[in-house]
Image (spheres, helix red, strand yellow):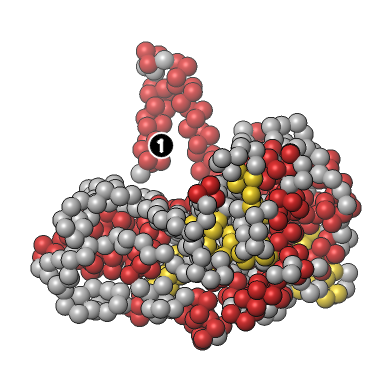
Amino acid sequence: MAGRIPDQFIDELLARTDLTDVVASRISLKKTGQNYSALCPFHNEKSPSFSLNPNKQFYYCFGCGAGGNAISFVMEHDHLDFVDAIETLAKDAGMEVPREQGAPDRYEQNAELLKRLSESSQFYQEQLIKSPQKTKATDYLSKERGLSGQIAKVFGLGFAPAGWDNLLKKIGTRAESQEQLLHGGMLIEKKDQPGHYYDRFRDRIIFPIRDSRGRVIAFGGRAFGDEKPKYLNSPETPVFQKSQELYGLFEAKQNTPTLEQIIVVEGYMDVIVLAQHGITNAVATLGTSVNSQHIRKLFKLVSKVILCFDGDKAGRSAAIRGLEAALPVMQDEKQVRFLFLPEGEDPDSLVRKEGKEAFNSRLEDASSLSHVLFDHARNQVTLGDEEGEAQFARNAMTMIQQIPKELTFRSVLIKQLSDQSGIDSDTLGNTATPKHRPSQPDVSGQQNQAPIEQATSHTHDYGYPPEYDDYDAYHGDDHTTHAPYETSQPRKFKKKSKFGNNNGQYNKFKEKELVFPPAPSSLSQIKQASLCLLLHPHIAKTIDLPDPLINQADDELQIFCKIWRYFSKYPKNNTGHLIGEITDTATTNAIYALLNHQDATTKQKIINANQEVLDMISTMENNLGLNSSIERLKSKGNESIKDNDSKQELRNLMDLIRRKKS
């Protein structure tokens, strides 16, 4: 059931869980005195800085600052959220996770449906081994696609034999099961016989689609020959929305030791073949273009997303849709890059031909978002004079303005555009451009009003009886060509580099020399001070915290005060000791969030951590004095502020307000 997991259960789970066993099952530990040491799994290092204390059941990395208990380790290492980590540890401990009363989520509401989908996946995997027709499937996977039995097992590949009711007879033996299979998209109801069903997937290789927790939520099926459609997806169901899911994401999290970047490709086989060649961090969209939800989801896991496309016109059009999806959800210190493959190649064919190292080299040379953005803005210009340059600037600004205003990255792009267009940054920044891209003229000059992500239409002509014509087509590793979003009119600029201006002054070599200014912190001043204390605990003994500040502390400041009190009392202890002794879950989670924040690396290297904390205290004292003065003067009323002392206090107050605004 849904609802909050009781604190008592979490305490009991931690008491019954040995952190050493949890960590040792995931990384190699070495006994060093009373503790264990290891190479930290959360950052690249050559000498061990990861320390585990089995007595206090906590770990801490002196290199990157990661630290915590068994729950936080599983969260970070397995890329799980808090609840999923609890459930993982509870399963290993043989415990059932209780929940306080609350409304069930969609997965709990559809627990039986998920069970039927899991049973369906097991059935298809069994058929790949036991079916009399299995040779057809195994030959296709091993001989035609070069897949090993091991990689097929990792991705749970299966086989749906020919026939109308194989799954129905195996799983849908009861009316309730049939109803669940129907809602899960596994069965189709006959149009002329209500209440009678047949299998959706027949005579196909089966690809289970798992969510981020590994639950089977849908399937994809590939035909063997020229049958149409070549790829068939489950329809959307209560547990499957194709625009929100990514094929292979669960496997990427499970099989990639250090997940720092994710490659987005276009087909199931691309993901699987790359994984077989040792590139385990690839995922694929499910019959839709890359959208903002996908990018946002991936940014929660990694700092770099590489969108991989075919090098033909359709691939470049898909890249532009990916660009448009990324702009509104960009974040400082996150990257989106674009890899265009040679024409006629896809990741599947290319990694077979070139191997892992060559493919990784291509990934390292992937084009930056700025390259693709400026190249696309110039591709739409048809004049090679000042008017064309002005239009290029407008096109680029239309896209740049989709990036959140507070990002340093946006300012960098405006500076780059200024360098290329000759228009100063202030003028560009104040340029008003349409919020939505204007429709582009087609070849005939008619305005194309189609949305950015157009659904690919498929004509059904499969030779099956009309009542069975209920396919939901999917473009898998044989990609469907989408109508490109770019003008078909010829360009009139001088020859230029692949991604750059018409004089070749901006190319990928110059881009590598750019030095981006530091991104503004997303942490509040109080959280920054708390992070300074966590990473430099020795400074606590040099800091005095005024009582009025402690008495009026809000949630953020209360956490800061707890950290300060602990290190003031135990000046020789480190953050690992602090985490090991805190019993308050909210405080522990807040500390984990700070230690794993992107600013932690920067804060760890600063030499003026003490001053940052003092500045925060000074600001809070000023705020406290300001608020007290305002309340006191308000209580007097305007007519009462006549004596010299009150007038002077008012002048001081106004001066303080002006200083705060400046």
* Residue 566 horizontal/vertical position (percent): 74, 50
* Residue 440 horizontal/vertical position (percent): 23, 55
Q: Secondary structure at mark 1?
A: helix
- Taking depth in this image into account, of 375 and 642 the one nearest to the observer is 375
Q: Quadrant of the C terminus?
A: top left
Q: Quadrant of the N terminus?
A: top right
- 260 to 558, vertically: above or below: below
Q: Residue at x 48, y 59 (%)?
A: 462
Q: Residue at x 44, y 64 (%)?
A: 336
37 relative to 469 in the view: left or right: right
Q: Mark 1: which amino acid?
A: Leu
- Visible residue check, residue 56: no
569 relative to 262 in the view: left or right: right
* Residue 106 horizontal/vertical position (percent): 65, 40
Q: Residue at x 24, y 52 (%)?
A: 448
- 219 to 316, vertically: above or below: above
What residue occupies the far top of the structure in this picture?
639
Report which quarter residue 68 is drawn in. Answer: bottom right
* Residue 244 horizontal/vertical position (percent): 53, 51
2 relative to 198 in the view: left or right: right
Label 1 Cα neighbours within 10 Å, binned few <14 / some 14-19 / many ≥20: some
Total label count?
Answer: 1
Q: Residue at x 10, y 68 (%)?
A: 385
- Taking depth in this image into account, of 483 and 158 the one nearest to the observer is 158
Report which quarter residue 499 is drawn in. Answer: bottom left
Q: Mark 1 sits on what residue? A: 656
- Visible residue check, residue 16: yes
- Taking depth in this image into account, of 85 and 167 the one nearest to the observer is 167
- 228 to 591, vertically: above or below: below
